Amino acid sequence: MFLLVIVHNVFNRRWYSSIAKSQRGPRGLFNTGVTFLLLFAMLALLVTSVLISNALSGIMAAYGGFTVRQIHTLAGYWLLIIVAVHLGLRWPLIMSVARSLPGITKPNTARSLALRVIAAMTAAYGIWSSFRLGIGTKLSMQMTLDWWNFDESVVGFFIHALAIAGLYTVITHYTIRLLQLRRKSSTPFQAGEQIVPLRQD
């Protein structure tokens, strides 16, 4: 996982050099903030993973205490949300790549409707999964007696996690869309139109 993160950052290294040069609006600032939160959460997860590692328990036994495990859990669940928001901000780009791979060039109403239905179903399942996994207590680092149940399916846990990620991806993407539509509707005239002054009789 960390190797994929390193490769991802290497491929997108030019983005870091463009932060100070480019003028950014609210969306750009939010995007930058989310990216650095993602970086911070990944580093926290990496450090705590080493400290609580069973393979390194003989070396790191003095550091891998209960508090470190709490921080590891907190970073892991927040990382799930931050990655989902990160994806939601880039969803148009992701969909553009997904369309270009099979060579889809023309819009299709039925396809768009089907994808929106899938997005709505994923979000609804993500809401239920949030309660199922107690995501609120995990994100607020509250003390609970909710430990890993070895009788439950591991696949089911990851399906819940993916549904929660899908929920926040959908929320982020459609919130951005709504803000864009509101901004367009508040514009008094379209680009290329001219304002004709009123005659003074």
Image (cartoon, grey):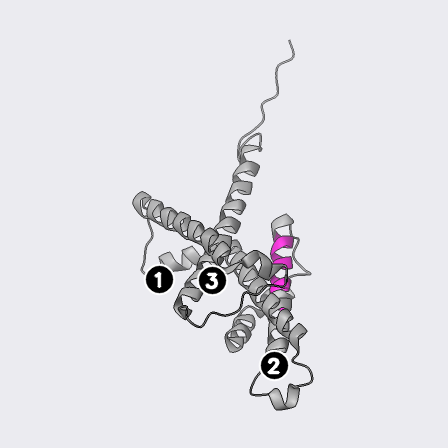
Position of residue 200 measured from the top left corner of the image (x, y, whole percent): 65, 12
Distance in Å between CA atoms under marks 3 and 1: 27 Å
Disc assigned to residue 37: none
| Residue 92 shows in this picture | no
Which of the two marks, 3 or 1, is nearer to us in this view? 3
SS majority, magenta: helix
Callout 1 environment at 10 Å: few (<14), some (14 to 19), or many (20+)?
Answer: few
Q: Residues within 10 Å of mark 3 (few under 14, many from 20)?
A: many
Name which residue type carries label 3: Ala
Give whichever of discs 2 and 1 has the lower sequence position.
Answer: 2
List the residue tagged with mark 3. Answer: 161
| Image coordinates for residue 89, horizontal then vertical, percent | 53, 54
Residue 141 quadrant: bottom right
Callout 2 amino acid: Val
Q: CA distance from mark 2 to mark 3?
A: 23 Å
Q: Residue at x 38, y 59 (%)?
A: 98
Contact (Cβ within 8 Å) of mark 3 with mark 1: no
Q: Is residue 37 magenta?
A: yes
Image quarter (top left, top right, bottom left or bottom right) of the C terminus: top right
Query: In this figure, which residue is indicated by the disc labeled 2?
Result: 50
Magenta residues? 28-39
Q: Secondary structure at mark 3?
A: helix
* In the image, residue 196 lies in the stretch drawn in magenta: no
Q: Residue at x 53, y 45 (%)?
A: 175
Q: Can you tell which mark lies on residue 101?
A: 1
Residue at 61% x, 66% y is 74
Mark 2 or mark 3, earlier in chain: 2
Identified by mark 1, the residue type is Leu
**Which residue is at the front of the view, 163 or 104?**
163
